[in-house]
Image: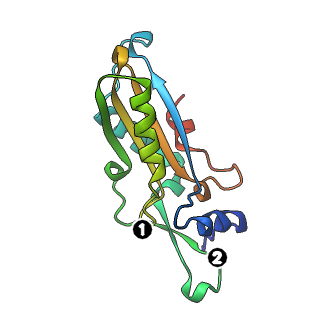
Amino acid sequence: MVNRLSPDDAMYYFLDGAGTTTHLGTLSILDPAQGDGATLDYPRLVALVENRLQQMPRYRQTVTEVSLGLARPLWIDDPDFDVTFHVRLSAIPQPGSDTQLQELIARVMSRPLDRRRPMWELYLIEGLTGGRLAILTKTHRCLLGDGSHPEISEVITD
């Protein structure tokens, strides 16, 4: 079965260009002191995301353009999918201030996504004041469709 980008998704895909991106982001700040005592670390987050990707096959697919632009691009399974390329560990110098976090977010969000891979990234950010952690997601708008495909932060937080 051929799975083409919808007209709206193709529009968002082609709107990306020099100085213009159509990815979306979410930021969750976690306070381990407020939880059940379980700690979140990079290996646990990778395992969680890998497990939840079963509910979101689109996040394992890349966009392939059709020769000569004669049709809308296709969703194709990425045979070399590596979850550790998409789930990344980052840190700000302790004690990480909100300003330092905002600067990191600005740098991450200003970079375009790699079109040769599934177009999403997730960052576990350590070093915030009070032992807090942050999870930053960056998802290309074409992955979300008409709302029928959840953003990755929706699937990992339950």
For disc 1, the marked residue is: 116
Which coloring applies here? rainbow
**Marks 2 and 1 in Cβ contact (< 8 Å):** no
Q: In which quarter of the image is residue 127?
A: top left
- In the displayed structure, 125 sits above or below 139; it is above
Marks 2 and 1, Cα distance to the nearest angstrom? 17 Å
For disc 2, the marked residue is: 72
- In the displayed structure, 10 sits above or below 147; it is below
Residue 6 position within the rendered picture, expressed as x and y whole percent measured from the top left: 69, 66
In which quadrant will I find the N terminus? bottom right
Question: Sequence order check: which comes first, mark 2 or mark 1?
Answer: 2
Q: Quadrant of residue 34?
A: top left
The kind of residue on which mark 1 rests is Arg
Residue 85 position within the rendered picture, expressed as x and y whole percent measured from the top left: 33, 52
Task: Classify mark 2: residues with Cα within 10 Å, few (<14), some (14-19) or many (20+).
Answer: some
Residue 156 as seen in the image, left or right of residue 123: right
Residue occupying image coordinates x 35% and y 25%: 40
Residue 76 position within the rendered picture, expressed as x and y whole percent measured from the top left: 50, 69
Q: Which of 131 and 71 is in front in this view?
A: 131
Q: How many labels does the image show?
A: 2
Residue occupying image coordinates x 62% and y 52%: 144
Residue 9 as seen in the image, left or right of residue 32: right
The kind of residue on which mark 2 rests is Arg
- In the displayed structure, 109 sits above or below 66; it is above
Q: Which of 56 and 103 is in front in this view?
A: 103
Task: Classify mark 1: residues with Cα within 10 Å, few (<14), some (14-19) or many (20+).
Answer: few
Residue occupying image coordinates x 64% and y 62%: 12
Residue occupying image coordinates x 47% and y 58%: 112
